[in-house]
C-alpha cells in the first residue's frame, strides 16, 4: 500500500515535470491544443467515476457541471478579473454545491431517480444561461484569456499545462478517495445500501460527499475551457458529447479503480481527436454510443477487468 | 445497572392502509436469547426494521439502553450497538472477506488494530482460511458466517439474526447455532428470527410469536410449543 | 393586466398540451411504471415515431393513418429491444438498474444519430388540410393542430388502460413485475408477457410521435426535452397509474403554458424538471400512488 503511494507520487512528479518541460522541447503548439482535450476528458472521466464508479450512482448530467464551470470561470474572469487559479477554485466550489443540491433532492430515494434528475440538470442550466444576458445568452460571449506567464512558451502550451495540473489533482483526489475509508464506504453503498447503513456507514452523507467531490472535479474540468476556446456558448459548454464521454470513458476503462477512467479517457479521447479530422461529430457520437452499448452489454467490468481476467487465467 | 437493553413501547407501523405491525410492546434483557417466530407477513421483518431504523415507527417508541432512539438514523443505531444480519446474505461484493469487516470497523472504536480485530472475528466464525478471498466466491454457509461476522465485529450489544440458517443443512445449522451461543456467552443479547423450529426452540430462553402484526404469545420454548394460539397459527384449527 | 382571455387560452392550451404529454409518457408508464425497466430511450422512440409519420406523410399518408400503420413495426421493434435487453442482463442474473440506464442512454443516442444521419438535423413537419385553421369559441382560440393530437392522447390512453385492466393478458402485464412466480404457475411465461408489454409500450411511441409532429416541427434530438416531462409524469403519477398520469400531465401542461404566457416561453422547458425535482424531494411515492 505505502509502496504504491510512493510510486504514484513519483509518477505525479514526473508527469508534472514533463508538463512544464515538454512545451519547450516540442515546438508544434498543435500537439498541446489536442492534448488539452485529452486531459480535459481524463479529468471529466475521473470526476464522474468518483460517484458513478465507486458509489454506483450514474450521472447523466456531467455536461451540466462542466458547463457551469465554463460559465462561472468565464464570468468571473471577464467581469471581475479574478486570476485563473481563483476561477478554477470557484468553479470547483460551484460544482460541489450543485452536486450536493442534486444529491440532496434525489438521493434519499433510489439511484434511478438521481440518474433521471441529472438528465434534467443540463436542460435546466442551459435554459438559465440562455436567459441571462450577462452571460451572453444563446449567442455566447468572447473571453480573452490571460497572457501566458514566462514559464510557458504560448497560450496553447499554457492551457495544456493548466489542464494537466487539474487532471493530476483530480486523479490524486480520486485515488485518495478510493484507498481511504470514503472509498470503502462508497463501495459498500454500491454493493448493498441497506447492509452498509446497518453496518454503521452514514450512507446519505457519504453519497453527498461523493456528489460534491465529483461535481467539483467536473466543474473544474470546464473552468479553463473559456480560455482554451476564447469563446463560450451554451451549445458547446453543455455539449451532449461531454455527458456521453463522461459515462463511456470510465465504463470502457473500468470503474473500480482510478486507473480505469484515465485509461478509458486516454484511449477514447485520442481516438476521437484523431477521428475528428476525418469523420463528422455525428459519426463520433454514433461510434461512442455503440462502444458504450457494447461494453455495458458484453464487458461491464471494462478493459481493466478484461486485462485482469486474462492475467488471472494465465497465472494458474 | 439497567435490566432492559432494548424496549419497544406501543410501536405501530402501517404502509398505506395496511397495518404491518402493532401496537407492540417488547423488552429485551442484556444477554438474553430471544426467539421470534410467526408466519410470513406476520410483521417480524417490519419489527426488525423498526428496531434497526430502516423504518420510523408511525406511533410508539424504541428505547436502547434507556435512550429514545425512535428518531435516529439506522447507521447511528448500528454504532450504538444494534447490529443485524440479513435474511438473504448481502456481502459487499467486490471486496475481500477481510474488507467486508473493515467497513463497520471504520465507524466504531475497538481496542488495538482494526485488522487484528477483523482477523480474530473471522477466525472465531471459521472463516480464517478465506480472509483474502473475494466475498463473491464464498459458499452459502460461508456467506452466512460472513454476514454474522460483519454484524458482530463492532462489538454490538444486541444482534438480530434474521433467518440466519435458512437453506442450511442440519450440520451447518449446528455450526451457526454454536457461533450464536458463543457470542451470547460473551454477553451479547441475541434476537433470532427463524422458521426452523427446532433451532429456535433450542436456542431461545424466551420465544414470542407474531401473527398479522401482533404479538400473540410469549414464553419459554416449552410454553410456546404448548400454546393453543401458536398451534392454531401453525397448524390451523 | 391578468386579462381573462390570456389566462383562459393559457389554461386550455396547457390542458391540451398535457393530454399530448400523457400520450408521450404512456409507453414509459408501462416499461418503467409497471415493468420497472428504466427505458430512458422512450422519448427518442417517440421522435423515431414522429419521423416514421413524417416519412409516410411525404408519400401522402395522413399522420393518424400513418401512425396506425406504424403500430406493428414499432411493436416488433419494442419486442426486439426487450429481447436484446433481457439477453444482456438475464445472463448476469437480473438487471442492474444503473447498467440498464446506461444501455438505454446509449441506445437513445444511437437512434438519434441514425435519425440525424438519414433525415438531416433540420426541423421536419407534416402538413395536412385539417391542421391549418383554428377553432374559435368565444374568447378561446384553439388551433386544430393542437386539438386533434390532444384528442388522440386520451383515446389511446383509454384503449391501453381498458386493455390492461379488463383483459387477461393485460392483467398479466400488470402482475408480471411482482408475481413472476404466480404467473409461471398459471402457465404464463413471464418473459413473453414482458416482451409483449414492451412491444405495446413502443407501439404507443408512434402514436405519440404522430401527435408531436402534428403540433409542430420535430428534429432528431428533440427527445431530450421530453425526458423531464415523461419521467415527471410517470413518477409523480405513482408508478404505473395510468389515469393518474393523465392528471399529472395536464398539471404540467398548464404550468408550462402559464410560465410561457406570463414569464417567457424560454423558461418552459425547465418547468417539468422543477416539478419533478420538487415532487421527488417531497413526495417520492407519487401524488396518486400509495406508499410502497
Image (cartoon, rainbow, N blue to C red):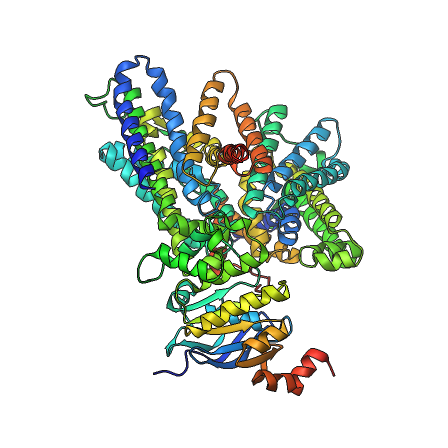
Looking at the picture, tell me which residue is in the foreground, A232 or C146.
A232
Return the residue found at the far left: A150
The picture places residue C46, in percent across and down from the top left corner, at 64, 39
Q: Nearer the viewer, residue B159 or C280?
A: B159
Seen at 56% across and 80% down, the residue is B207
Residue C9 appears in the rendering:
no
What residue lies at 62% left-to-right and 58% top-to-bottom? Answer: C244
Relative horizontal placement of residue A135, taking residue B201 as reference (left or right): left
Closer-to-camera residue (B188/A8): B188
Residue C206 as seen in the image, left or right of residue C228: right
Q: Is residue C69 above or below residue B127?
A: above
Q: Position of residue A180 (x, y in %)?
A: 35, 47
Where's residue A257, x and y in %? 43, 39
Residue C148 relative to residue A49: left or right: right
Q: Nearer the viewer, residue A16 or A223?
A: A16
The N terminus of chain B, quarter of image: bottom left
Q: Is residue A259 above or below residue A192?
A: above
* In the rendered image, the vertical position of residue B223 relative to residue A34, given as above or below: below
Quadrant in the rendering for residue C180? bottom right
Residue B221 visible here: yes
Residue that lies at the very extreme toward the top in this rendered image: A27
Q: Which quadrant of the figure has residue C81?
A: top right
Amino acid at each position: 500500500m505505502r509502496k504504491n503511494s510512493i510510486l504514484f507520487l513519483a509518477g505525479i512528479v514526473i508527469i508534472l515535470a514533463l508538463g512544464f518541460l515538454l512545451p519547450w522541447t516540442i515546438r508544434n503548439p498543435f500537439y498541446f491544443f489536442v492534448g488539452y482535450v485529452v486531459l480535459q476528458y481524463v479529468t471529466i472521466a475521473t470526476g464522474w467515476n468518483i460517484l458513478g464508479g465507486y458509489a454506483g450512482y450514474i450521472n447523466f448530467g456531467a455536461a451540466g457541471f462542466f458547463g457551469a464551470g465554463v460559465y462561472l470561470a468565464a464570468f468571473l474572469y471577464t467581469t471581475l478579473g479574478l486570476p485563473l487559479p481563483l476561477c478554477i477554485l470557484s468553479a470547483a466550489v460551484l460544482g460541489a454545491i450543485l452536486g450536493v443540491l442534486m444529491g440532496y433532492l434525489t438521493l434519499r430515494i433510489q439511484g434511478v431517480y438521481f440518474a433521471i434528475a441529472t438528465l434534467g440538470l443540463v436542460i435546466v442550466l442551459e435554459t438559465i444561461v440562455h436567459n441571462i444576458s450577462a452571460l451572453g445568452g444563446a449567442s455566447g460571449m468572447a473571453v480573452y484569456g490571460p497572457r501566458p506567464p514566462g514559464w510557458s512558451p504560448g497560450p496553447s502550451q499554457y492551457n495544456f499545462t493548466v489542464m494537466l495540473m487539474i487532471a493530476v489533482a483530480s486523479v490524486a483526489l480520486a485515488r485518495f478517495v478510493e484507498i481511504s475509508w470514503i472509498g470503502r464506504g462508497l463501495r459498500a453503498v454500491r454493493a448493498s445500501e441497506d447492509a452498509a447503513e446497518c453496518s454503521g456507514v452514514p450512507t446519505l452523507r457519504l453519497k453527498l460527499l461523493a456528489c460534491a467531490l465529483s461535481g467539483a472535479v467536473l466543474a473544474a474540468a470546464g473552468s479553463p475551457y473559456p480560455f482554451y476556446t476564447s469563446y463560450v456558448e451554451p451549445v458547446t459548454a453543455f455539449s451532449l458529447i461531454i455527458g456521453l464521454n463522461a459515462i463511456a470513458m470510465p465504463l470502457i476503462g473500468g470503474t473500480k479503480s482510478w486507473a480505469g477512467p484515465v485509461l478509458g479517457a486516454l484511449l477514447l479521447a485520442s481516438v476521437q481527436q484523431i477521428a475528428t479530422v476525418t469523420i463528422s461529430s455525428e459519426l463520433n457520437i454514433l461510434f461512442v454510443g455503440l462502444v458504450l452499448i457494447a461494453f455495458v452489454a458484453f464487458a461491464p467490468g471494462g478493459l481493466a477487468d478484461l486485462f485482469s481476467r486474462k492475467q488471472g487465467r494465465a497465472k494458474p | 445497572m439497567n435490566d432492559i437493553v432494548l424496549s419497544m413501547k406501543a410501536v405501530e407501523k402501517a404502509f398505506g392502509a395496511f397495518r404491518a405491525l402493532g401496537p407492540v410492546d417488547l423488552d429485551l434483557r442484556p444477554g438474553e436469547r430471544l426467539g421470534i417466530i410467526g408466519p410470513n407477513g406476520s410483521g417480524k421483518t417490519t419489527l426488525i426494521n423498526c428496531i434497526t431504523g430502516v423504518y420510523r415507527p408511525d406511533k410508539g417508541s424504541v428505547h436502547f439502553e434507556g435512550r429514545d432512539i425512535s428518531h435516529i438514523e439506522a447507521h447511528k443505531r448500528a454504532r450504538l450497538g444494534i447490529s443485524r444480519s440479513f435474511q438473504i446474505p448481502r456481502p459487499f461484493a467486490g471486496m475481500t472477506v477481510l474488507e467486508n469487516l473493515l467497513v463497520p470497523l471504520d465507524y466504531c472504536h475497538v481496542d488495538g488494530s482494526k485488522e487484528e480485530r477483523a482477523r480474530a472475528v473471522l477466525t472465531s466464525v471459521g472463516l480464517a482460511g478465506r480472509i483474502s478471498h473475494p466475498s463473491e466466491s464464498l459458499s452459502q454457509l460461508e456467506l452466512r458466517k460472513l454476514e454474522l461476522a460483519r454484524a458482530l465485529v463492532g462489538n454490538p450489544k444486541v444482534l438480530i439474526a434474521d433467518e440466519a440458517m435458512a437453506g442450511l443443512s442440519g450440520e451447518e445449522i449446528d455450526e451457526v447455532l454454536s457461533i450464536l451461543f458463543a457470542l451470547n456467552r460473551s454477553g451479547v443479547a441475541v434476537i433470532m428470527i427463524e422458521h426452523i423450529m427446532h433451532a429456535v426452540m433450542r436456542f431461545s430462553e424466551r420465544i414470542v410469536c407474531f401473527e398479522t402484526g401482533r404479538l400473540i404469545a410469549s414464553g419459554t420454548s416449552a410454553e410456546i410449543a404448548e400454546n393453543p394460539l401458536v398451534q392454531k397459527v401453525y397448524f390451523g384449527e | 393586466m391578468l386579462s381573462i382571455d390570456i389566462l383562459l387560452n393559457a389554461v386550455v392550451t396547457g390542458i391540451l398540451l398535457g393530454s399530448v404529454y400523457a400520450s408521450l409518457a404512456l409507453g414509459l408508464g408501462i416499461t418503467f411504471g409497471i415493468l420497472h425497466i428504466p427505458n430512458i430511450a422512450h422519448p427518442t422512440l417517440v421522435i423515431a415515431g414522429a419521423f416514421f409519420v413524417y416519412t409516410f406523410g411525404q408519400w401522402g399518408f395522413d399522420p393518424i393513418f400513418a401512425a396506425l400503420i406504424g403500430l406493428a413495426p414499432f411493436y416488433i421493434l419494442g419486442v426486439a429491444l426487450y429481447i436484446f435487453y433481457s439477453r444482456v442482463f438475464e445472463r448476469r442474473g437480473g438487471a442492474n438498474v444503473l447498467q440498464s440506464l446506461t444501455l438505454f442512454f446509449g441506445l437513445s443516442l444511437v437512434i438519434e444519430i441514425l435519425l440525424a444521419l438519414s433525415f438531416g438535423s433540420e426541423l421536419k413537419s407534416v402538413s395536412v388540410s385539417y391542421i391549418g385553421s383554428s377553432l374559435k369559441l368565444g374568447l378561446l382560440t384553439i388551433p386544430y393542430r393542437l386539438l386533434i393530437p390532444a384528442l388522440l392522447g386520451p383515446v389511446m390512453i383509454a384503449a391501453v388502460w381498458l386493455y390492461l385492466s379488463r383483459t387477461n393478458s393485460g392483467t398479466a402485464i400488470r402482475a408480471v413485475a411482482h408475481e413472476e412466480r404466480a404467473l409461471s404457475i398459471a402457465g404464463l411465461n413471464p418473459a413473453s408477457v414482458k416482451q409483449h408489454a414492451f412491444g405495446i409500450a413502443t407501439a404507443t411511441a408512434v402514436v405519440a410521435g404522430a401527435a408531436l409532429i402534428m403540433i409542430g416541427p420535430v428534429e432528431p434530438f428533440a427527445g431530450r426535452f421530453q425526458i423531464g416531462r415523461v419521467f415527471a409524469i410517470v413518477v409523480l403519477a405513482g408508478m404505473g397509474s395510468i389515469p393518474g398520469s393523465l392528471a399529472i400531465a395536464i398539471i404540467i401542461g398548464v404550468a408550462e403554458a402559464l410560465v410561457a404566457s406570463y414569464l417567457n416561453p424560454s423558461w418552459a422547458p425547465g418547468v417539468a424538471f422543477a416539478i419533478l425535482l420538487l415532487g421527488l424531494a417531497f413526495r417520492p411515492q407519487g401524488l396518486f400512488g400509495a406508499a410502497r
